[in-house]
Image (tube, grey):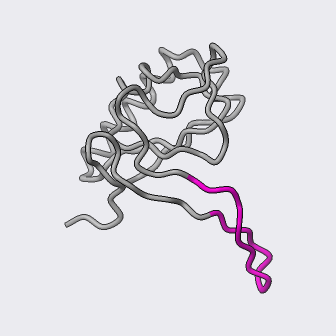
Amino acid sequence: TVWLDVEGKKTFATPVPDLTRMINDWAAKIAGAGYVAGLYIAPPQPFTGPELAKLAVTRYWNSAGRVQDRNGKIWDEPEGIGFCMRQGYPQGFFRDTGVFVDPDMVWADRRGRVPTWVRA
């Protein structure tokens, strides 16, 4: 799975139709190259759950933060799809490198899909 990070002020300020077109174009190129297109979702989030579900991606990864859409609604998943991965809050620290590590939890989404790390 190749993940696209969808978060931040610039993303939030992009009109949803434009952002939808950009993401769908990107997903088509990823799929055309033989990979699985996925979105990393974090606040602030311009998409609603139903809008996310209509995108041309097939995997969703939720950030450690609560996802709130542009209408102020807090939601737990793209409409009827669910997340196949969730980022945990930084819980580990490698003293040798000074790097915080946050564990990511993986499970099947509501359609039975998981992130693909290696694919034939």
Question: What percent of the width, then of the height, locates residue 26?
Answer: 40, 37
Question: What percent of the width, then of the height, locates residue 57?
Answer: 35, 37
Question: What percent of the width, then of the height, locates residue 94?
Answer: 74, 79
Question: What percent of the width, then of the height, locates residue 89?
Answer: 68, 56
In-image side of 59 versus 45 (left or right): left
In-image side of 105 versus 119 (left or right): right
What residue appears at the point 52 percent right and 33 percent down from the top-left corner?
A: 76
What residue appears at the point 65 percent right and 36 percent down from the top-left corner?
A: 66
Q: Quadrant of residue 55?
A: top left
In-image side of 101 versus 57 (left or right): right
Q: Quadrant of the C terminus?
A: bottom left
Q: Nearer the viewer, residue 22 or 69?
A: 69
> What span is colored magenta in the figure?
87-102
Q: Nearer the viewer, residue 109 or 60?
A: 109
What residue appears at the point 71 percent right and 61 percent down from the top-left corner?
A: 90
Is 99 contained in the magenta span? Answer: yes
Q: Residue furthest bottom?
A: 96
Q: Is residue 8 above or below residue 69?
A: below
Label total for image: 0
Q: Quadrant of the N terminus?
A: bottom left
